[in-house]
Amino acid sequence: MAGQQDKSFVRTFVGVIAVLVVVTIVLIVLAGRTGLTPGAQEERQELARERAEQRLQPIGAVRVGGEPMPEVFQAQAAAAGPRSAEDIVQGVCGACHSTGVMNAPKIGDEAAWKERMGQGLDTVVKHAITGIRGMPPKGGDTSLSDDEVRSAVLLMLEKSGISAQ
């Protein structure tokens, strides 16, 4: 009886091993057909690494005084292309000029803008570019070009009823 059990165990054991070998071969064949080759795995790892690097890029920087903008952000600003005057006024200038924060002339306040225009358009634009009193250079967005700042100033003047042309 013990011999019979041993033979039964060996048959079962060999059968299980044979099934596992067949399953392994099938999985290897399927892996080859689905692109899970070593080269494809390396490509996927490289792609995953690139995506991780993109996610880890800084979204901002702290600058003190007149430090230049980091190259990463200069490149991003250049790649984005020029912005419209309306976008700049809404996204940058409007933060102070729509509410009059720190005595900034409100958009639409013709008298306040006429007072500043007494200095001349070039001076008003120069102050917008370099900053004046509580206003930071370029309204705090140093990625703006001088031409973009000028167009935003002209739009704010226009919305305030002043023709600077």
Image (cartoon, rainbow, N blue to C red):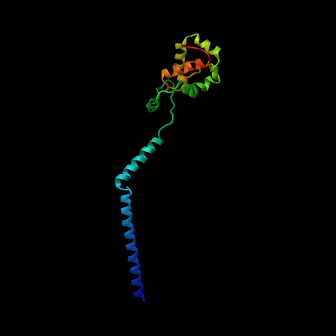
Q: Which of 16 and 32 is in front in this view?
A: 32
Measured along the vertical axis of the image, is residue 151 above or below residue 5?
A: above
Measured along the vertical axis of the image, is residue 4 above or below residue 27?
A: below
- For this orientation, the residue located farthest to the bottom is 1
**Residue at position x 58%, y 12% in the image:** 117
Percent coordinates x, y for residue 165 in the rendering: 54, 13
**Residue at position x 39%, y 87% in the image:** 3
Percent coordinates x, y for residue 76 in the rendering: 46, 32
Q: Nearer the viewer, residue 11 or 134?
A: 11
Horizontal side of 86 relative to 12 (left or right) equals right
Measured along the vertical axis of the image, is residue 160 above or below residue 141?
A: above
Based on the displayed image, in which of its 4 quarters is residue 5 positioned?
bottom left
Q: Nearer the viewer, residue 105 or 137?
A: 105
Horizontal side of 14 relative to 77 (left or right) equals left
Count the numbered circles shown.
0
Image quarter hosting the N terminus: bottom left
Percent coordinates x, y for residue 94 in the rendering: 60, 25
Percent coordinates x, y for residue 64 in the rendering: 51, 27
Q: Nearer the viewer, residue 82 or 146?
A: 82
Measured along the vertical axis of the image, is residue 90 above or below residue 54?
A: above
**Residue at position x 41%, y 83% in the image:** 8
